[in-house]
Image: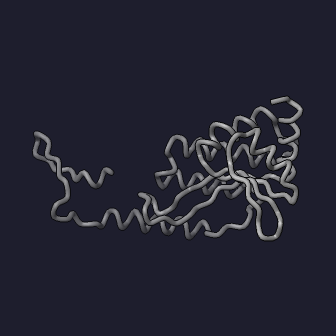
């Protein structure tokens, strides 16, 4: 890619783009929350968004009912391998976007190291996210997220072992419930 295109797209994203972290309740996850990273830009003109999609090599482009086009990348691997390296190479000028991007990268590292699967990692993500996008609108409050995490931890500790649960006995005859480790 020509450098001027990279800088142009980064400049466009500096003004119109957004880096977000969302928590979605999930019943089918070990944790009660799925934590998702998302980079997006919305605009009435599809051409520049199509350029972003083409040069980043990932994401989806779609139109909303109000005629606004929306470019979004929410696949973690695409964010880690394409979006983050692109914006590290073609920096932002505004202090706000630099700050939000740095925090976005910090959260991506937490997820990459799978620390988001522990309560301490979720607390750290919440703390970092608090300072992104000037606080932004949040569907779930920090209190709701933490309450559900604590309830989930408490439920896990209280689940009695069922008949048929897999048990591994070591040579010292101590029992370990395999289901507790998975």
- Measured from the top left, where is residue 105 in percent x and y? 67, 43
In front: 94, or 9?
9
- Measured from the top left, where is residue 94 in percent x and y? 87, 45
Query: In the image, is residue 83 above or below residue 61?
Result: above
Image quarter (top left, top right, bottom left or bottom right) of the N terminus = top right
Q: Which residue is depicted at the point 68% across and 58% down? A: 130
Left or right relative to 166: residue 70: right
- Measured from the top left, where is residue 59 in percent x and y? 68, 48
In front: 58, or 153?
58
Query: In the image, is residue 31 above or below residue 181?
Result: below
- Measured from the top left, where is residue 98 in percent x and y? 79, 44
Left or right relative to 51: residue 106: left
Q: Which residue is depicted at the point 68% across and 44% down? A: 58
Q: Which residue is depicted at the point 74% across and 58% down? A: 62
**Figure quadrant of residue 101:** top right
Q: Which residue is depicted at the point 48% across and 68% down? A: 148
Left or right relative to 93: residue 148: left
**Figure quadrant of residue 156:** bottom left
In front: 118, or 47?
47
Rendering colour mode:
one colour
């Amino acid at each position: 890619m020509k450098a001027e295109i990279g800088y142009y797209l980064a400049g466009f994203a500096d003004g119109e783009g957004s880096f977000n972290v969302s928590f979605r309740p999930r019943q089918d996850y070990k944790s009660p929350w799925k934590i998702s990273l998302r980079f997006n830009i919305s605009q009435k003109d599809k051409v520049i968004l199509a350029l972003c999609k083409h040069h980043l090599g990932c994401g989806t482009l779609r139109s909303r009912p109000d005629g606004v086009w929306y470019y979004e990348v929410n696949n973690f691997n695409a964010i880690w391998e394409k979006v983050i390296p692109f914006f590290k190479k073609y920096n932002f000028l505004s202090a706000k976007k630099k700050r939000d991007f740095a925090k976005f990268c910090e959260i991506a590292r937490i997820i990459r190291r799978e620390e988001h699967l522990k309560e301490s990692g979720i607390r750290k993500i919440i703390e970092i996210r608090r300072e992104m996008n000037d606080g932004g609108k949040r569907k779930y409050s920090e209190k709701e997220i933490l309450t559900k995490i604590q309830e989930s931890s408490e439920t896990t500790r209280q689940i009695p072992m069922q008949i048929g649960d897999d048990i591994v006995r070591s040579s010292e005859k101590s029992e370990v419930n395999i289901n507790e480790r998975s």
